[in-house]
Amino acid sequence: MVESSSENTYTDTPNSLNGDSEGSFWVRLRNNVKTFLVDGFHPIFYAPVMGTGISSNILYSFAFPARWLEICAYIMGVICLTIFIGVNILFLLALAQRNGLWQKIHKDPKIAPFMGCFVMGFQSLMMFLHAITRESWVWALWVLWWITSALSVYLASIIVFLSLLGKHRNKKSQVHFHDISFTYLLPVVTLTVAASFGGNVAEDLPNINVKVITVVVSYLMWAIAVFFASIITSIVYWRLFTHKIPASGAVFTMFLPIGFLGQGAFAILIFGKNCVSMLMDNHDKVLSSQYTNFIHNGAAKVGADVGSVATMLAVSIMVSSTAVALFLIAFGYLTTFFAVASVLSKSKPFAKKPNLACVYTSSTSPAVRYFEGALRFNRGFWSMTFPLGTMAQANVELWRMYHGFSAFRYMLAIYSVTLLCITIGCLFGVLVRGIQMISSSLRPKAECKESV
């Protein structure tokens, strides 16, 4: 997601050994953690929270339900929570020890947009909590929804303005055309996730007025996000048309537009479902409601019969919501193809001259030799997870509302299985990097490579 070299090294420096090679394991490990996880902290560290969070939601609400899938969802949810707590600790330590970090996460266009990973990771975790608690914790989750909504609005307005639109004296903070990428979508997509979260919570709210407020606010966030994300996507596609797909180190950013399309479709479907539910549950009060007073006044002038107005409103809203969702899902399918094709074009056998710094080369290790020519694991792999998960959510919601559309159920299965395989692979990659960090701490003068 951040274009960079594919490798960095864990190297024990003289400071970490206090001038000799007899430094303790714990001293070396502490210095490695400080160097690479605190001093080198980046908001993209929250990407695993997004990936594991969306995976737990998909496992729990899979279209082909099974008890063992729910158990796997709980396990994935615990992993997500553990990573979220750990990265929050690193973030707080980095804020305390690194001067200027607070300013960078607000003004630096190469860092600030990635704060969207923090908010979306938190939102996906809260959505899973809602899925397993439903009505029992609905008011607590409603309060948490307001918090995540405030964070989303802050990101999409304040941080986007300061980092991408506002003028700064520091020329390093200027945005150049070759730096334009889909990562600018990250703070905007948080609004669609907040809209989905609000729609899910609204289903279980007992008070109709609170439910209406929640649904309307969610829709407003959805509308802002879809329109703004469409502008950013158009600009980035202009950049792709003129300068082609990103380099190997940043090619996985091609998956990011899938996120706002899938999550946008999911959110508008939930909006339509909530409107239908509220209209049907209160059909006898629709005409007397303050929200539909214009219908009663208009009908009274011409003497029209409005006995079935609740049904007509419900059908019209549902049809409109479904049409918009299908529009977004359809483009999501196309962008999925573009993303997969872009990644394949950077590795053998499709790439004639792959970037050797970003692919696995010949090795004596049988495991590495098996992946020779493929892109090396790096933290950009996590950018595939959340977008694929949003498309899975959109497809399953569409199938549940219209059971005749069985094809969407199988599209869900394809996206879900792909998502889970990538998430497990990424978790394994993170585990390997952690083991490498520990092993480098065991050997005073060892050097151990880590993918950036």
Image (tube, rainbow, N blue to C red):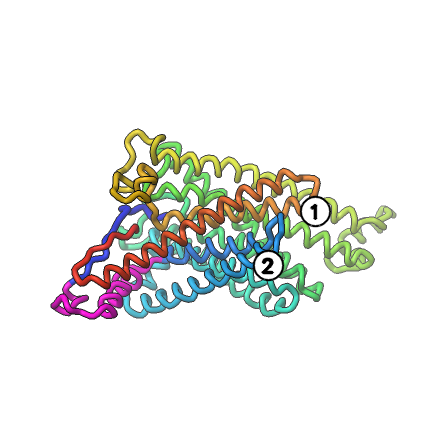
Residue 257 lies left or right of residue 108; in this view the side is: right
Q: Residue furthest left?
A: 19
Q: Which residue is mark 1?
A: 317
For residue 247, what is the image quadrant? top left
Which amino acid, by three-letter code, is at mark 2?
A: Gly
* In the image, residue 420 above or below residue 198: above
Q: Is residue 446 left or right of residue 223?
A: left
| 347 displayed left or right of 220 | left
Helix, strand or loop for the magenta stretch, by majority = helix
Q: Position of residue 196 (x, y in %)?
A: 58, 54
Provide the secondary structure element on which disc 2 rests: helix
Q: Is residue 340 visible?
A: yes
Residue shown at 36% from the left, 32% from the top: 242
- Taking depth in this image into account, of 237 and 447 the one nearest to the observer is 447
Q: Which residues are magenta?
A: 14-42
Whole-percent x and y of residue 394?
58, 46
Position of 97 relative to 326 (above/below): below
Residue where numbered disc 2 is placed: 198
Viewer-closest of 433 and 357: 433
Q: Compute the Cα span from label 2 to label 1.
A: 18 Å
Residue type highlighted by circle 1: Ile
Determine the secondary structure under disc 1.
helix
Question: Per the image, is 135 magenta?
Answer: no
- Name which quarter of the figure residue 43 lies in: bottom left
- Residue visible at 37% across and 57% down in the picture: 45
Q: Residues within 10 Å of mark 1 (few under 14, many from 20)?
A: some
Which disc, if any, is residue 212? none
Image coordinates of residue 76 in percent, x first then y, are: 49, 58
**Residue occupying the point 27% across, 51% down:** 172
Going from the N terminus, do you reach mark 2 or mark 1 first? 2
